[in-house]
Amino acid sequence: MKSGIPASLLEQLRQQACATPEVEICGLIAARDGQPVRCMQIRNIAERPRQHFNMEPREQIAAFRQLREQGEELFAIYHSHPDGPATPSATDIREAGYPDALQMIIVPHQDGRVDISAYRFRDGRAVPAEIDSPDS
């Protein structure tokens, strides 16, 4: 299953991950009528933010409120893996709270490139999902 994500949103994910490559960034991607429209970065408050992410609760609640108020839905949850790989960890799969959302992982590289992968979590396992950019 392919998910079309605009190049501008993929670039925002790249910029976020490369801006703080020493910690996992995290956030939501909002969609309107099933089409991704914006990234909503949420502060990572995990005790070990290089290895885990934990979205700041008030920011996460505010982001979901904005989704509802603007007639949007949750398209994806994203986070980075500063030390790679671009595959979900057992913790990522175990702690996933929104099974219908695409799960995206970004790995920043020192030269400014990123690897981005996407998954659907089903029955305790990660199923790869293709992403592409409809405007590339």
Image (tube, rainbow, N blue to C red):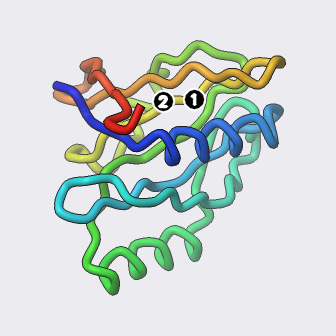
Q: Quadrant of the N terminus?
A: top left
Residue at x 34%, y 28% (from the top left corner): 132
Residue at x 81%, y 41% (from the top left corner): 20
Q: Tell me which amino acid carries mark 1.
A: Ile
Q: Position of residue 91 (x, y in %)?
A: 48, 29
**Image quadrant assignment for residue 55:** bottom right
Pointer 2 residue: 91
Crowding at label 2, few (<14), some or many (≥20) Cα neighbours within 10 Å? Answer: few
Pointer 1 residue: 106
SS at badge 2: helix
- Vertical comparison of 136 with 35: above or below: above
Q: Position of residue 41 (x, y in %)?
A: 60, 58
Q: Tell me which amino acid carries mark 2.
A: Thr
SS at badge 1: strand
Q: Position of residue 34 (x, y in %)?
A: 19, 55
Residue at x 70%, y 25% (from the top left corner): 108
**Image quadrant assignment for residue 112:** top right
Q: Quadrant of the C terminus?
A: top left
> Is 32 on the left-hand or right-hand side of 105?
left
Q: Nearer the viewer, mark 1 or mark 2?
A: 1
- Mark 1 to mark 2: distance in Å? 16 Å
- Which one is in front, 44 or 131? 131
